[in-house]
Amino acid sequence: MRRRQLALAALAALVIVASLVAASGCGTSVLLSTPLPPLSSVTLTPETDTLLVGEQRQFVAVAADTDSVAVPGATFSWSSSDANVFQVSRTGRVTAMGEGVALLVAAAGGRSDTATVVVFYQNGWYTQPSATSNDLNGVFFQPDGRAGVAVGDAGTVVRTVDAGRSWFNEASSTSFNLNDVWFTTAATGFAVGNGGTIMRTRNGGATWSRLTTVPASENLNGVCFADTSRGWAVGANGVIVRTTDGGASWTRSNPTSQQLQSVSFSDPLEGWAVGDGGVIVGTHDGGASWYVVQPSVTSLPLRSVWRTSATRAWAGGLQGANPFTVPTPDSLQWVLGTFGALNQVNSLQLRDGVTGYAVGTNGPGLVLKTVDGGASWQPQVANTAQALHDVWFVDTRRGWAVGATGRIVHTANGGN
């Protein structure tokens, strides 16, 4: 009886295999997967790679057993963290689809490894179509480097969802010049402009409405938020308005009579604002009170300030003015550096305190880069004749600058 059961089981197995072969077509073999032994690791190479859109790259994964011996014939599942950036085949072949940074994952036997894939369109700085000829004054991008908004004269708002490959106009509900923009989440953002204008969006920039609780009629030039609740805007006559409730209400102060152009906070309490006459004002209490830095380090107009920590901040302005902070035994001090007397810097940003960019004009458009925390700045090829008014980087490689007559230039490889 036992022999008969074994014979029937063997016959059934042969029937199943024959059926699989028949279903697969004449001359086609069926690969039966072999169970994996317990694994200690999966290793993916290369660990990082950079591709141009449309390029392909083969990645290799190796599984190791508990004795750290490679397992031959292991089958992996492959996935992309963002199919808009790249797609991956069942064999680990990556195809670059659109600009961005995404993770490649190879998994087997409960183990996995990841590789970083960077995709961009071309090297250096290059022009993107902006959908407007109005001056653009401010730009902001979400951390993913795909969704961004730029604002400008006559209430201009342009938006992208594909890293700037295409930009389209949005109705801003104002005709006032808009001078700066900041987002606190992917959906909520603020644009400030002339006539005390503060516009808010709650859908990523698709529609905007004007806030009516702003106690200012002066032109507002710069805006910054430290989190979703606390934000500041600065402008003419030294006005500073602040909110602690996400823009529902605002209070004002005037620590100086000089026009303020830019404001920067790296935490909710400590911040700087700069402006005409080389004025620098600071706060230690989130803007409840402000003090003027004395003595002044320059009388040249300052256009931008960026703060990364309690001791590090940089400013830029006309005739190459470049004040920056240095720590002292009991505090910190502003000292005066230079971008070069022929360079007017309108905006600067240091993402990590080491690598940074400054934009403006020295006739044509100007881009400068530092890789040593602002100790030195080197010119890059901006590829634009237009003055640049603002810059935004989502990391040390991917950034956008906007300027006169709707100019937008972009780099995805640090301007190299």
Image (cartoon, rainbow, N blue to C red):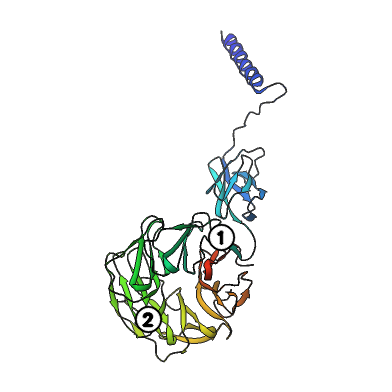
Quarter of the figure with the N terminus: top right
Instruction: Check the image and name the residue furthest to the right.
Output: 27
- Separation of marks 1 and 2 at Cα, in angstroms: 38 Å
Residue type, label 2: Gly
* Disc 1 target residue: 129
Q: Which amino acid does label 1 sit on?
A: Pro
Q: Please say if 69 is above or below 290.
A: above
Q: Quadrant of residue 284?
A: bottom left
Residue drawn at x 66%, y 37% is 73
Query: Label 1: how many residues lie within 10 Å, few (<14), some (14-19) or many (20+)?
Result: some
Disc number for residue 282: 2
Q: Kindly state the secondary structure of the residue where label 2 is placed.
A: strand
* Mark toward the viewer: 1 or 2: 1
Residue 163 in sight = yes
Q: Residue at x 63, y 69 (%)?
A: 383
Q: Nearer the viewer, residue 358 or 79?
A: 358
Q: Is mark 1 on a helix, strand or loop?
A: loop
